[in-house]
Image: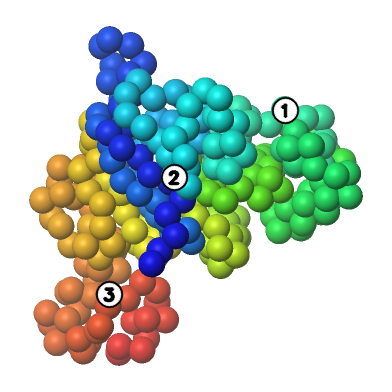
Amino acid sequence: MKEKILEVTNLSFAYDQNHTALQNVSLAIYRQEKIAVLGANGAGKTTFFLNLNGVREPSGGEIRYRGESIGRKNINQLRRKVGIVFQDADSQIIASTVKAEVAFGPMNMKLPREEVEQKTLDAIREMKLENYVKRPPHYLSGGEKKRVSIADILAMDSEVMIFDEPTASLDPVNAEILEEVLNKIEQKGKTVLLSTHDVDFAYRFAQRVLVFCNGALIGDGTTEEIFRNEELLQRANLKRPVFMQLYDLLYEKGKISKAQEYPKRISDFALLL
């Protein structure tokens, strides 16, 4: 049986009387899942994340962490266990050097100094930031800042790690590094949720896809289930990944044999051809 970490029941959130951002969202999140959260701008993805890690307080419904209902008295527990990397790295960076920035989270957790140092250095190495430790993070490039903000969360060793548009501002090389890091995080037993407009990245990375539309969760299934649902994709203004379209075209033309599952990489197509 899969190990349940978070359970959301009828979660609702409104910024004001005229703007309901989330409507009765219910789902469970399990250990070591890789989840892509999709939807158009304004669909509710970021608001869902902010409620999930305790930055925002739900207007209605309930969030449970490992069976315990979360309220104002234990909200800090949720914030320690569910880390988030924001789309805008500048909104997350506060320290004067890269090393101090990455160390900030573990220090706030009141860990022993030796453990703070080890977690900080491990995260810096993971994100290939060894040459930046003494540099002010605010003067780094957009992609470098993003890597620092990801190192922040890695150092805190959160059980659930949320990435809001993680590939935004990254060039192809850094995007590839990020994808490798995300896979390593999942292999360590962590749960990864990320929002993205890149359906090809979501298709390649995720095991499960959540689809939001106008604040409601309208789709929750495996990657293949979601991307084969044309009605759902149209409703959410999404398109099918290129590799799925290419496979269907080549199969219909008799150019490749039937596969047990849709290919996700060029190497998968090479095996079919």
Three-letter code for the amino acid on which mark 3 is drawn: Tyr
Tell me the element at label 2: loop
Mark number, residue 41? none
Three-letter code for the amino acid on which mark 1 is drawn: Ile
Residue located beneath label 1 in the image: 94
Q: CA distance from mark 3 to mark 1?
A: 43 Å
Q: Earlier in the sequence, mark 2 or mark 3?
A: 2
Side of 40 relative to 168 (left or right): left
Residue that appears at 15% across and 42% down: 235
Quarter of the image for residue 270 reads bottom left
Q: Residue 36: horizontal and vertical position, in percent?
A: 38, 52
Asked whether the viewer can see residue 92, the reply is yes
Instruction: Give the position of the C terminus as an image quadrant.
Output: bottom left
Residue located beneath label 2 in the image: 67
Q: Residue 200: horizontal and vertical position, in percent?
A: 36, 59
Q: Earlier in the sequence, mark 2 or mark 1?
A: 2
Numbered disc in front, either 2 or 3: 2
Q: Nearest the camera: 100 or 2?
A: 2
